[in-house]
Image (cartoon, rainbow, N blue to C red):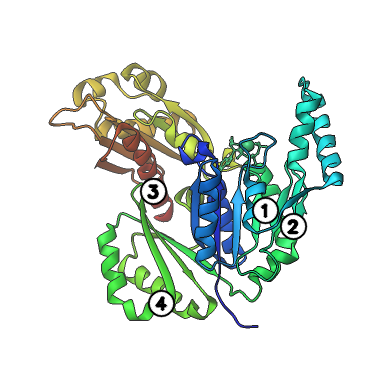
Amino acid sequence: VAQATRRAGIVVTGTEVLTGRVADKNGPWLAEQLRLIGVDIAHVVQVGDRPDDLRNSLQFLVDRGLDLIITSGGLGPTADDLTAEIVGSFQGRPSRLDVALEARIADIVTRISAGRGWRTDPEATAAGTRKQALVPDGASVLAPVGTAPGLIVPPADGAAGAPIVVLPGPPRELQGMWDAVLASPIVQDAIRGRDELRQQTMRLWGVPESQLAATLRAHDDAFGGLEITTCLRGGELEIVTRYAPPAQAAYDELEKAVAADFAPELFSTDGRTVEDIVADELIARGLTIATAESCTAGGLASRLTDRPGSSAYLVGGLVVYSNEMKTQLAGVPAELIERVGAVSAEVALALAEGARDRLGTDLGVGITGIAGPDGGTAEKPVGLVHFCVASAQEPLSRKVIVPGSRADVRARSVTIALHMVRQVLESG
Ligand code: ATP
Ligand code: MG
């Protein structure tokens, strides 16, 4: 079988997604599932609930010569849910009522309505059910996870084009149908003979993108067959590389070049995030951590608990917004705050040690800064944040002027603190 790249396109429907009221979860989820089976994603198109826009985006994707097209949304019982019918007519396959399917959906709807105590109008329910049971000629039906069945609609017999997989909008329902999509012979046929598609992620901390660009340029000729994307996110530089198996040696070269040029900054080559690494290290060594946060007000403690099992290392956190609470809860001397100010290296140190002492942990983290937009001075501008990680070693202190809005300063400060904890753990 000839090896080749198989490519897919996705149409995400729904005016609520198009206008940004609901953030699209289905495009990214489908893109990752497709990558896992070696199918590259060419386009994700978002459209509102308008027949012409949906038809045009299907045509756009078919014109690109893609192997598979997937739609999400618009399978409900209401009149604005049009996807199944439009896809059917687009593929030249008129729809017909599937009586068995109609009975099955009616059954589900009755059960759900009874369970939730909803008042239903039998006639309206029947109309909605009948609509959802219309199946294009020659299409396969995917069993409903909610009430709406999915569809796999091949192109008209003898016509060029791609099979269109029609999935419901609610992410839980769409995801619940995915195994059935992969099991479908029509889909398997469309993606047969595909190459494996590998993806690797490197993460760096404290490197401007321009520096990395220089490294990539210097080794340009060695990196054939790699699709390298770099993305700067919250101060971390992420390098995601996709390639087919024959380019593995080229990828190994890339990783070597980045590791050589950025040894101190490269903190992850296996896909782990900074919180993964911090959690893994704390667990591996049986260490505990506590926080005393002013401007981030618990943001660090919150991120430290994103992973299940975090009680193994996070003991607790103090939110000490006022000076009084810095003194009362974290034991920062009032005289010290009076003398050097709450936003200072000294107070960050006292917070870190206070968290460690009062909560009885191996590590303590202190954060104090000016998130803005007001409250800055020439000496202490908005974005000035002092950090400290106290441990059995020398405390690690940093002062950073974090750029951006109030939300940026707070989020970025949490990331900086996490990297400082990682550095302390890695250094001993
Ligand atoms: P329903 O029977 O619920 O109407 P449907 O297949 O018609 O199902 P939609 O009407 O498009 O789906 O979407 C139903 C709800 O699912 C939306 O209001 C939204 O909350 C969620 N949803 C739809 N599409 C997406 C998406 N791409 N990302 C995240 N959530 C989505
Ligand atoms: Mg709907």
Nearest-to-viewer mark from 2 and 4: 2
Label located before the other in sequence (2 or 1): 1
Q: Quick one: SS at disc 4?
A: helix
Whether residues under marks 2 and 1 lie with C-beta atoms below 8 angstroms apart, the answer is: yes
Label located before the other in sequence (4 or 1): 1
Label located before the other in sequence (3 or 2): 2
Q: Quadrant of residue 191?
A: bottom right
Amino acid type, mark 1: Gly
Amino acid type, mark 2: Ala
Q: Calculate the distance from the C-alpha at mark 3 to the C-alpha at mark 2.
A: 52 Å
Amino acid type, mark 4: Glu
Work out whether residue 271 can be spotted: no
Find ligand 2 in the image and state its quadrant: top right
Which residue is labeled 2 in the image? 139
Extreme-top residue of the structure:
324
Which residue is labeled 3 in the image? 419
Which residue is labeled 4 in the image? 253
In this view, the residue in front, 143 or 388, is 143
The structure residue drawn at horizontal position 49% and vertical position 33%, both measured from the top left corner, is 360
